[in-house]
Every structure is written in structure tokens, then in C-alpha cells.
Amino acid sequence: MFKEVQNSLTDYGKILRKSWESTWNHKSLWLFAVLAGGINSGVIFHNLVRGTWRLEPTDAWSSAIIEQSIDGLPWLLRYLQEIFTLEPARMIGSLAILAIAVALFIFLSIAGQQILVTGLTQHSKSKRVIAFSKIVKEVRHMHFWQLFSINAFMHLSLALTVLALAFPLTTLLGAAPAMESLIYFAFYVILVPIIFVVHAFSMFAMIYTIRHNASLHEIVSRSWKMLSQHWLAAFELSVLLFFVNILVALIGSIITLLTIVPLGIIAFTSTAGGSMTIAIGLGIMGLIALTIFSVIVGGAMITFNYSTWVHLVERSERSGILPALEHTFLRIRKFFAK
């Protein structure tokens, strides 16, 4: 049994290695990955517990549950409240600026997704490093509305799922606080499969949309077939990808901390000595360095995440992967069948 499981892990290791090679050899895609990450980082479970951290026991339906269930909604509502307190002319201008900013953000994110997946797909097919100019040429036209629909479906489905589960959860927490652990466990048991199915289906649909320029019906059919046939391999790989991202984030945080602390000490010493210029200069330098570091690491990891999904699709279409859990279940069934 352990040999078969090791073979499955070896297959996943090969996918992750190829994904890192694609990422390292196409650094020109990292900036577009940062744009794509604005709406989808490629990691399924990284937002899994955000909504539950902020939920509190309640016995009534309230706007607070909605705000806590949809990421970013509290900030948007507060901003809109501030806009509606302005004079009519300034209010209209502020709303117009907000609409333009949101539209630009969505457009750049979707453009980043298309360029990123196009480059990674070309590399997966040819096994060669693809020049950025050739990647741009491969983007013959934008699949804006298809990709917009896929991303909207993913975010709305996840938000509505958390929202639908949030009210029963908070109500039970208020009625039976002693059962908090059991309630949260049940919540995750329901939420995890839904998040996985929605996100994995959306990733497959995004890849097929960019690769094949097919009709919506064909994209949905291909994506659902891929998910239904290879869901366990996709789940296992997405878990590995999640922990890889956690590890990189931890290392990045340590590096940031080791950089900021010495700069803070020097700035504090300079301020105590009456030299504000040095302190301000160090603050600006630290902010610039942190921004550059975040863009580089974030771009590389998002490229790696997308590349992993592209290589998973390519491998699944070619020969498939027998998941480690399936190996284990088959062995257990044979053992009890004797």
C-alpha cells in the first residue's frame, strides 16, 4: 500500500516541480499573476476560515451576518455610506470614480488571468520557454465575458454558501454555546466540499475557456467531466498546494520581520537623536522594499498556483493520476474481502 501511495505522491511532486519550472522560466508573467490574483489566487482553501473567525452568537437575522460572510463587503458599505453623505454633485462624481475603479480592476484582473494561463498552457504543450512576445500574440482576443462569468459564479457561489450557513451557525452558537466545537465542525464538514467543488470547477472552466475558445455549454461540459473524473486527485493536489502557500507565506513573514525590526530600531535611534530625516528615509526605503518583495513573492506564487492547475489538467487528460486515498481505500477493501 505504501508503495502505491508513494507513487501518487511522486506524481504530485512531478506536477509541482514542472509548475515551479514554468514559474521560474516565465518571470515576465509574475506581474500579470499579481493582477490575476486580485480575483483568484489559485489556492482553494486560503479563504476557508475568514468568515467563521468574525461570526458571533446571535438569534436574529442581521446585516452584520451578511457583512461577515462576504469578504470585502464591510469596507465597501462603509465607503458607500461616506459617499452618500456628500453633496449631490460630489456624490455623483465619487460614485462614478468608484465604478470606473472597480471596472478597471476587474478588466486588469481578467486580462492578467488570460495572459497568465495562455503562457502557462503554451509552455505545458511545447515544454519550452515561451517568449513573452509570443505569449501576447497567442492572446488573439479577450474572453472577457466568459472569464467574468466564471469568476462571478465562483465568488457569488462561495459568498452565498457562507451566507446560507452563517445564520444557522450563529443562531446555534447563541442557543447552545456549550456545543461550539461540534457546531463549527459541522459547519466545516458542509463548507469544505462546496468550496472545493465550486473553486475547482471554476479553475477548470477558466483553463478550458482560454485554451479552446468554445461555447459556454462545451466549457461547462468539459469542466464538469474533468471534475467528476479527477476530483480526488484535484482535491489532494489542492491540499498540497495550500500547505505550500502557507509555508511560503510563513517564510516571507519571517524575512519581512527580520528586515523591518532592524530598520525600526535604526529609525527609533535616529528619532531619539533628533534626526527625523534619516527616520523618514528609512521608512520610505522600507516601504518600497516591502512592496517590491511582496509583488515578487506574490507574483511567483500565484503563477505557481495557476501553473499547477494547468499541469494537472494536462496530466489528467494524458494519463491521469490514481489518488493516494484511492490506493488506500482499494487496499483496505481487498484486505477485508479476504
Image (cartoon, grey):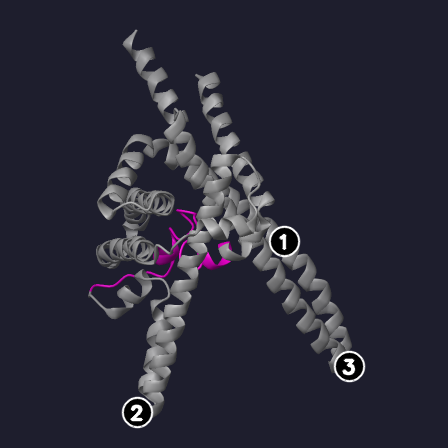
Position of residue 39 in the picture relative to residue 186 (left or right) = right
Counting from the top left corner in percent of width and height, residue 327 is at 38, 21
Counting from the top left corner in percent of width and height, residue 272 is at 76, 79
Residue under the point 49% across and 53% down: 136
Q: Disc 1 to disc 3, how far (Cα)?
A: 29 Å
> Magenta segment, which residues?
33-59
Per the image, label 2 sits on a secondary structure element best described as: helix
Per the image, label 1 sits on a secondary structure element best described as: helix
Instruction: Please give the residue where the numbered disc 2 appears in the rendered image.
Output: 88
Residue under the point 57% across and 59% down: 295
Residue 50 inside the magenta-drawn segment: yes
Instruction: Please give the residue where the numbered disc 1 appears in the rendered image.
Output: 254
Residue under the point 31% across and 67% down: 67
| Circles 1 and 2 in contact, beta carbons < 8 Å | no
Instruction: Please give the residue where the numbered disc 3 appears in the rendered image.
Output: 275
Question: Amino acid type of disc 3?
Answer: Ser
Position of residue 272 in the picture relative to residue 284 (left or right) = right
Q: Disc 1 to disc 2, how far (Cα)?
A: 48 Å
Residue 93 to residue 17: above or below: below
